[in-house]
Amino acid sequence: MRELKETLAITKALADKNRLRILMMVKNREACVCQITEVIGNAPSTVSKHLSILKAAGLLDSYKQGRWIYYHRPEQPSTAVKMALSFVFETLEGSEAIAQDRLVRTVVCQQDPEELTRNCSANASPAGNSKSESGSESMSNKGRIMFLCTGNSCRSQIADGIAKHLGRNRFEIYSAGLEAHGLNPRAIKVMDEIGIDISNYTSDEVDPKLLGAMDYAITLCGDAEERCPLTPPSVTKMHWPFPDPAKATGTEDEIMEQFRLVRDAIAKRLEAFFDGLER
């Protein structure tokens, strides 16, 4: 009976993609709870629940050092836990989503734990499209970035999601279009492949007043660059042209491959952008 309960607990714990991401985070190195929160991108309360489930199943262990709680692989795992972890580590080692998490963690681990703790608190509300609970745009002293394309359907939404993931709460991220064409289902799918959920994002027309409050306005297509509303000198305008994956043709696999190529190209451009800001 004990073995059955343990197996059920392990099975339940592994039935969530973010819990799998957490396990991969601690495969070779411990991580404090706020580092995990920053990389996973969930609310602190949600991450705490994930950690509790993993620990109850014996898949994680932890210790406290000063104010910080660190999580790591169990030092004396049961046979069932050892087999489960081995399966997870071997299966997910080549995952693009895990590779992205490792890239983000490299940046996160360079931050002071005190700063991460403040970020954890700031991230306690859902990310959405940078809206407050009342629906109005939240303005703070953070840097502000808006991504623009024709219909706020694919490229700008992908950039929005990746920037939130890489920006680590240092920026308010927005996206908009010259028109609102609706969120493309394939954009949701291709982002889900790398562990970023944009399914609750909305497709919005650009608000010139909000655009004028940005630090950076980044256009992702020629149409948006040519027709972008006028901005004050305080807004740094950048143009990163990417092909529109919504215009891809062929089989579903061929179309999705075009979405992946654009997604990965945007991710690389954003990595270079954030790296440049840190220098």
Image: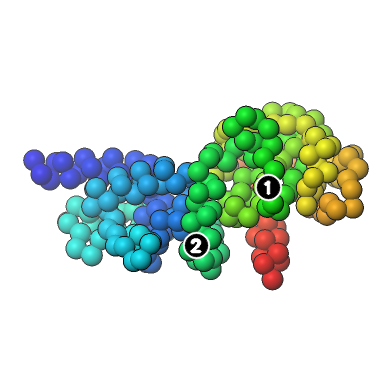
Residue drawn where x is 62% and y is 45% of the image: 161
Compared with 45, 170 (above or below) is below
Tell which of 276 and 188 is nearer to you. Answer: 276
Q: Residue lying furthest left in this view?
A: 1
Residue drawn where x is 53% and y is 60% of the image: 115
Name the secondary structure under disc 2. Answer: helix
Tell which of 250 and 149 is nearer to you. Answer: 149
Between marks 2 and 1, how big is the CA–CA gap? 20 Å
- Residue type at tag 1: Ser
**Mark 2 lies on residue:** 114
Compared with 35, 153 (above or below) is above
- Residue type at tag 2: Glu
- Left or right: 204, with 190 as reference point: right
Residue 229 position by quadrant: top right
**Mark 1 lies on residue:** 140
Image coordinates of residue 180 in percent, x first then y, are 75, 29
Residue drawn where x is 23% and y is 58% of the image: 82
User: Disc number at residue 111?
Assistant: none
- Left or right: 168, with 203 as reference point: left
User: Is the residue marked by circle 2 packed among few (<14), some (14-19), or many (20+) residues within 10 Å?
Assistant: few
- Left or right: 89, with 215 as reference point: left
